[in-house]
Image (cartoon, helix red, strand yellow):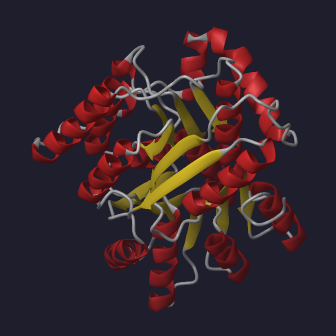
């Protein structure tokens, strides 16, 4: 790792590719079947299970500092995060990553850029160009849309920067052996199945429901379509809307949905911001009878769970993602192999739990970002 530096011509090629991308037509988005599922990938690549076990164990333990003299210079870490949203996932990860790196004794410089999710791709390209000129050792980004897929394909072909994709645990099959350095996140399909189990238990006789997707993309497919396929026929899908992934967009879609289908028993929301928007719509309509879930477990969602606006929240063990990235960087410095995918755990919180239970899970999920370490 210490000898890795970007070849200038590769950096220029990557930057040129991103410029050309802005003028390129939109490519067709890959479907769910075009990605490896988390469990499916490890069945195909059992040799990586040991590396995953080692990384998972490191994430669960207290930080063990790197050996003195392992680094000859500070690492350059760049991130382009869609963190301008109500969900705290991205800023929490940035804080937790820095704290874990500090505890590991890893010297680094961090450059971060922020956008709104899915709607500022031109700005993301500009930010990536700027950061590539800095020649980072690691670049943290995400994959949800077809445009982002094209961006990533140019990055993995034209730069030696180690690309870590966050909030995704499904490698694209078409990339074959030319994958990003690592995928870190949560299994969106597994989260959807956990919420499906919850709603089936809450409405054992069946129910009428609607689905509020994020914007069109992989995450909406994994969270939304997996849910629809996981509930029994007695749970009847009456309405569904794509949104722009924002709280305002969630509110607008929920209002329209409930005006068209006022008989809905619950709304399945596919993200934090969309869920909070649905809560706003229910308050506006005076509809306390419709159940809405949260997706992520941000502080805003936990507050709405306490207030009764949300009846269930799928909570991610949020900081595990950042800890895994820090520990993966440590393994890289030590010359150790690491798994291509790391996926953290979920827990479903609901209105039947005590505040003590909820607070205990919240403290575990955000043990770094909430100031616990």
Residue at 71% in and 41% down: 106
Residue 228: x and y, percent?
A: 46, 46
Q: Against 201, is 222 above or below?
A: above
Residue at 16% in and 47% down: 22
Tally of numbered discs: 0
Q: Against 5, is 264 above or below?
A: below
Residue 100: x and y, percent?
A: 74, 48
Q: Residue 24: in sight, yes or no?
A: yes
Q: Quadrant of the N terminus?
A: top right
Q: Nearer the viewer, residue 16 or 88?
A: 16
Q: Nearer the viewer, residue 196 or 17?
A: 17
Q: Is residue 52 left or right of residue 163?
A: right
Residue at 56% in and 24% down: 340
Q: Is residue 252 left or right of residue 275?
A: left
Q: Residue 30: in sight, yes or no?
A: no
Q: Against 289, is 12 above or below?
A: above
Q: Is residue 208 left or right of residue 53?
A: left
Residue 190: x and y, percent?
A: 60, 40
Q: Nearer the viewer, residue 133 or 201?
A: 133
Residue at 32% in and 64% down: 244
Quadrant of the rendered image containing residue 143: top left
Q: Against 57, is 259 above or below?
A: below
Q: Is residue 338 left or right of residue 65?
A: left
Residue 10: x and y, percent?
A: 30, 27
Q: Quadrant of the C terminus?
A: bottom right
């Amino acid at each position: 790792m210490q000898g890795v530096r970007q070849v200038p011509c590769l950096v220029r090629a990557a930057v040129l590719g991103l410029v050309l991308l802005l003028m390129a037509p939109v490519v067709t988005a890959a479907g769910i079947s075009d990605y490896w599922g988390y469990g499916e990938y490890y069945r195909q690549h059992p040799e990586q299970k040991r590396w995953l076990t080692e990384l998972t164990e490191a994430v669960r333990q207290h930080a063990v500092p790197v050996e003195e003299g392992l680094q000859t210079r500070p690492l350059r870490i760049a991130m382009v995060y869609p963190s301008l949203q109500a969900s705290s996932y991205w800023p929490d990860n940035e804080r937790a990553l820095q704290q874990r790196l500090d505890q590991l004794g890893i010297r680094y410089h961090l450059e971060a850029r922020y956008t709104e999710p899915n709607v500022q791709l031109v700005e993301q390209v500009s930010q990536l160009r700027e950061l590539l000129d800095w020649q980072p050792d690691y670049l943290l980004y995400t994959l949800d849309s077809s445009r982002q897929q094209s961006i990533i394909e140019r990055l993995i072909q034209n730069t030696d920067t180690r690309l870590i994709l966050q909030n995704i645990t499904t490698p694209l099959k078409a990339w074959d052996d030319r994958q990003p350095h690592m995928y870190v996140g949560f299994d969106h399909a597994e989260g959807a199945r956990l919420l499906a189990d919850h709603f089936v238990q809450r409405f054992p006789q069946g129910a009428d429901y609607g689905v509020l997707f994020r914007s069109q993309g992989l995450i909406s497919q994994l969270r939304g379509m997996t849910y629809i396929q996981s509930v029994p026929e007695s749970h009847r899908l009456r309405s569904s809307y794509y949104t722009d992934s924002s709280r305002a967009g969630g509110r607008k879609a929920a209002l329209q949905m409930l005006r068209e289908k006022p008989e809905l028993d619950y709304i399945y929301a596919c993200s934090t911001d969309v869920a909070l928007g649905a809560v706003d719509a229910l308050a506006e309509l005076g509809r306390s009878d419709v159940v809405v879930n949260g997706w992520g477990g941000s502080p805003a969602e936990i507050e709405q769970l306490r207030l009764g606006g949300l009846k269930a929240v799928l909570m991610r063990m949020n900081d595990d993602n950042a800890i895994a990235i820090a520990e993966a960087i440590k393994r890289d410095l030590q010359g150790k192999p690491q798994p291509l995918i790391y996926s953290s755990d979920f827990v479903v919180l609901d209105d039947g739990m005590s505040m003590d239970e909820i607070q205990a899970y919240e403290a575990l999920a955000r043990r770094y970002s909430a100031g616990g370490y």
